[in-house]
């Protein structure tokens, strides 16, 4: 009788044994919860394609923050859904803009909870692009102007830091945005405020539900001249290299599920903290299948999250953050 030379099953014999040899874990410390804030009164409105995720007016925001704090989550990521939009996205850098107001309030309710501000113009521009748009008569084509957009992004970041944002998270994918924002923050005296750069952001269909939620679908064209081609892996390293050189403190890969290889590539190349963004459609797909009774939501979500950790992520932005916090508190 020939016995197996190697018996990997020995270390799987009991739950305690498996716990002992477990390589990765998802903890509360890993999770960032995105929140949508809007103008108006008494609004807590569910986003149809994202069950369990809401738009909050400022007067209803405290109940959500109290819940997030009580669950022990370390950070929220704020998205503004403004009423007023214009060509230059001026409500993004208005000192009394929706994100700035929400930030100030949250810091008074819970000064320990980290407020991460998404720094982009697309929710604030009437055309829905992430920067300033120029129409080229000769080519009969509109495109997003890089350098003019940088100035507005830096202004947005400074106004967010002024309001008390703990981390600036620029998601616009203009060239040089980290440098421009770092310089803007430093000049304004916010040299201690870190930048979590959406370094590797793909032109992805997985943002569909978010764009419904944030009313930020481009009114013409698409984002393919600034967000990355999903077919490219090496280019992710060039994007991340630039951000590291420009002073990014943390790097993000977005979306996460279809881009685990990219998370791993960044993990192997950089020592900076790496963040995975488990985006809106990754959430909606699980919710839809779970609602049909086709999958077990809790185990699917926890398996996905530990997968991000295994791929090399240090932190995860996820609409499931509150659910996960409850599940792991009980397990
Ligand atoms: C803004 C922004 C987007 C997301 C986060 N920040 C949308 C986009 O780039 O179109 C998507 C997040 C998600 O899908 O959950 N630029």
Image (tube, rainbow, N blue to C red):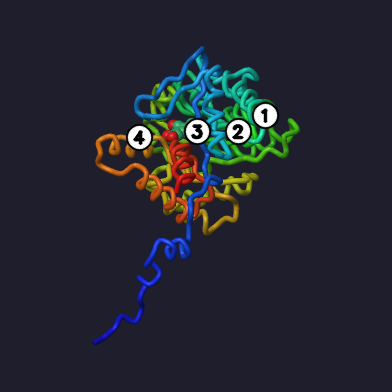
Q: Quick check: marks 2 and 1 in contact, CB under 8 Å? A: yes
**Mark toward the start of the polypeptide (2 vs 3):** 3
Q: Which mark is residue 115?
A: 2
Q: Residue at x 39, y 64 (%)?
A: 14
**Mark toward the start of the polypeptide (2 vs 1):** 2
Horizontal and vertical percent position of residue 140: 40, 23
Q: Quick check: marks 1 and 3 in contact, CB under 8 Å? A: no
For the residue labelled by badge 1, is the local secondary structure a helix, a strand or a loop?
loop
Q: Which mark is residue 34?
A: 3
For the residue labelled by badge 2, is the local secondary structure a helix, a strand or a loop?
strand
Residue 79 placement, left or right of 289 = right
Q: CA distance from mark 1 to mark 3?
A: 17 Å
Question: Which residue is identified by label 4?
Answer: 284
Horizontal and vertical percent position of residue 134: 50, 23
Q: CA distance from mark 4 to mark 3?
A: 14 Å
Q: How many marks?
A: 4
Q: Is residue 310 above or below residue 202?
A: below
Specify few, some or many for label 1: CA neighbours under 10 Å numbering under 14, 14-19, or 20 or more. Answer: many
Q: Is mark 3 within 8 Å of ligand 1?
A: yes
For the residue labelled by badge 3, is the local secondary structure a helix, a strand or a loop?
strand
Question: Which residue is identified by label 1?
Answer: 164
Q: Residue at x 66, y 26 (%)?
A: 108
**Mark toward the start of the polypeptide (1 vs 3):** 3
């Amino acid at each position: 009788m020939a016995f197996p030379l190697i018996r990997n099953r020995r270390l799987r014999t009991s739950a305690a044994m498996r716990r002992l040899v477990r390589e990765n874990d998802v903890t509360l410390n890993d999770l960032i919860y995105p929140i949508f804030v809007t103008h108006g009164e008494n609004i807590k409105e569910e986003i149809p394609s994202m069950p369990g995720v809401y738009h909050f007016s400022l007067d209803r925001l405290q109940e959500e923050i109290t819940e997030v704090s009580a669950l022990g989550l370390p950070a929220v990521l704020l998205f503004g859904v403004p009423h007023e939009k214009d060509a230059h996205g001026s409500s993004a850098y208005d000192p009394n803009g929706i994100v700035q107001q929400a930030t100030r309030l949250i810091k008074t309710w819970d000064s320990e909870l980290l407020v991460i501000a998404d720094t982009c113009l697309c929710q604030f521009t009437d055309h829905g692009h992430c920067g300033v748009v120029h129409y080229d008569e000769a080519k009969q084509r509109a495109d997003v102007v890089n350098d003019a957009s940088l100035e507005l992004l830096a202004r947005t970041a400074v106004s967010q830091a002024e309001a008390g944002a703990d981390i600036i998270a620029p998601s616009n994918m203009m060239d040089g945005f980290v440098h421009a924002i770092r310089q803007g923050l430093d000049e304004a005296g916010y040299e201690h405020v870190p930048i979590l750069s959406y370094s590797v952001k793909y032109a992805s269909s997985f943002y569909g539900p978010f764009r419904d939620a944030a009313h930020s679908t481009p009114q013409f064209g698409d984002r393919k001249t600034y967000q990355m081609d999903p077919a490219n892996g090496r280019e992710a390293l060039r994007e991340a290299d630039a951000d590291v050189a420009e002073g990014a403190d943390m790097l993000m890969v977005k979306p996460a599920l279809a881009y685990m290889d990219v998370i791993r590539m960044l993990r192997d190349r950089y020592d900076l903290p790496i963040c995975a963004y488990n985006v809106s459609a990754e959430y909606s797909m699980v919710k839809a299948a779970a609602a049909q009774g086709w999958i077990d939501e809790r185990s699917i979500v926890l398996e996905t999250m530990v997968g991000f950790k295994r791929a090399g992520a240090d932190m995860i932005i996820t609409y499931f953050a509150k659910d996960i916090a409850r599940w792991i508190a009980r397990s």
